[in-house]
Image (cartoon, rainbow, N blue to C red):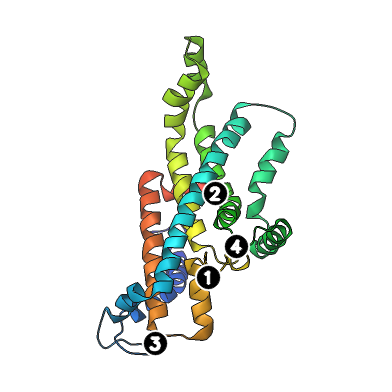
């Protein structure tokens, strides 16, 4: 029984059903053998999934998104680790500014970031570069990695590190043998959360992608503006599966309840 009784339970069930119903419908439609989006489905087929894997543009965009998300998540963790250590282990002027600077992409609309990145790349002649696209995604997803790493560091006891230093351990040894293992759940969770957000990013990517670096969400958006057929549902189902698998892995490594706390 929930805290507020049956009405609260019914309310939460209805909210969850409202949120999950579109995803369930998309996944069901993905298995239709028909040429149109139809509900209910009278039979199941993998026809449109096979079409996805035969579609060269979708497959290229998938690999672009996979590589992009991997690189962006890795860069974001590489930036978040020293920043997290600086914010939690030291007191210095500008500490609040540094924290706000790295978390600012969370409050700036991605549409604004996309326009700003497009203008910047046009000014420096970097339009169409895959590595500048990686940098743009790293800017967007670094706050997610930083929040989880900060949560892990704040939850650890710094006196353990001080004790190791007092016994003669070098700073590198303390980091490698004590600090890094303590922050590992936040680091791995932050990497996965950054990967998920980069893989699903659309709004900013629309502005900074080039024909040779089109990501999967952008390809889906472009395809949807021209036609809607069950192949679009199949691609969406595959994206949902990848995201769900990453979220399950994140829950196993870090715990979704701790992720939600780290985001507050």
148 left or right of 120? Answer: left
Q: Mark 1–mark 2 contact, CB under 8 Å? A: no
Q: Mark 1–mark 4 contact, CB under 8 Å? A: no
Q: Mark 2 falls on what kind of element?
A: helix
Confirm whether residue 6 shows in the render.
Answer: no
Q: Mark 1 falls on what kind of element?
A: helix
Pointer 3 or 2: first along the chain: 3
The answer to which of 260 and 7 lies nearer the viewer is 260
Q: Quadrant of residue 29?
A: bottom left
- Mark 3–mark 4 Cα distance, whole angstroms, equals 35 Å
Q: Mark 4 falls on what kind of element?
A: loop
* Disc nearest the viewer among 3 and 1: 1
Image location of residue 146, percent across then percent down: 56, 43
Which residue corresponds to mark 1?
A: 218
- Mark 1–mark 4 Cα distance, whole angstroms, equals 14 Å
* Disc nearest the viewer among 1 and 4: 4
Which residue corresponds to mark 4?
A: 128
Q: From what the image shows, is residue 11 above or below residue 170?
A: below
- Mark 2–mark 4 Cα distance, whole angstroms, equals 26 Å
* Disc nearest the viewer among 2 and 4: 4
Q: Mark 2–mark 4 contact, CB under 8 Å? A: no
- Look at 49% across and 45% down and name the residue there: 74
Image location of residue 255, percent across then percent down: 41, 47
State the mark number for residue 37.
Answer: 3
- Mark 3–mark 2 Cα distance, whole angstroms, equals 36 Å
Which residue corresponds to mark 2?
A: 144
Confirm whether residue 161 shows in the render.
Answer: yes
Characterize the local packing of mark 4: few (<14), some (14-19) or many (20 or more) Cα atoms within 10 angstroms: some
* Disc nearest the viewer among 3 and 4: 4
């Amino acid at each position: 029984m929930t805290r507020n009784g049956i009405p609260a339970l019914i309310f939460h069930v209805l909210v969850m059903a409202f949120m999950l119903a579109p995803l369930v419908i998309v996944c069901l439609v993905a298995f239709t053998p028909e040429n149109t989006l139809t509900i209910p489905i009278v039979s199941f087929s993998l026809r449109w999934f096979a079409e996805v894997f035969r579609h060269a543009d979708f497959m290229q965009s998938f690999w672009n998104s996979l590589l992009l998300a991997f690189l962006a998540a890795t860069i974001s963790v590489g930036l978040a680790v020293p920043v997290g250590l600086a914010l939690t282990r030291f007191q210095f002027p500008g500490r609040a500014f540094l924290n706000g600077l790295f978390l600012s992409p969370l409050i700036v609309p991605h549409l604004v970031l996309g326009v700003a990145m497009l203008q910047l790349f046009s000014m420096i002649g970097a339009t169409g570069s895959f590595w500048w696209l990686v940098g743009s995604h790293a800017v967007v997803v670094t706050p997610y990695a930083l929040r989880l790493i900060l949560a892990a560091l704040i939850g650890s006891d710094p006196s353990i590190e001080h004790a190791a230093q007092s016994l003669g351990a070098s700073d590198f040894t303390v980091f490698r043998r004590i600090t890094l293992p303590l922050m590992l759940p936040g680091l791995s969770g932050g990497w996965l959360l950054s990967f998920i957000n980069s893989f699903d990013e659309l709004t900013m990517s629309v502005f900074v992608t080039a024909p040779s670096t089109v990501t999967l969400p952008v390809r889906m958006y472009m395809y949807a503006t021209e036609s809607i057929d069950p192949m679009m549902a199949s691609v969406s189902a595959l994206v949902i599966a990848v995201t769900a698998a990453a979220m399950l892995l994140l829950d196993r490594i870090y715990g979704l309840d701790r992720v939600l706390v780290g985001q507050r």
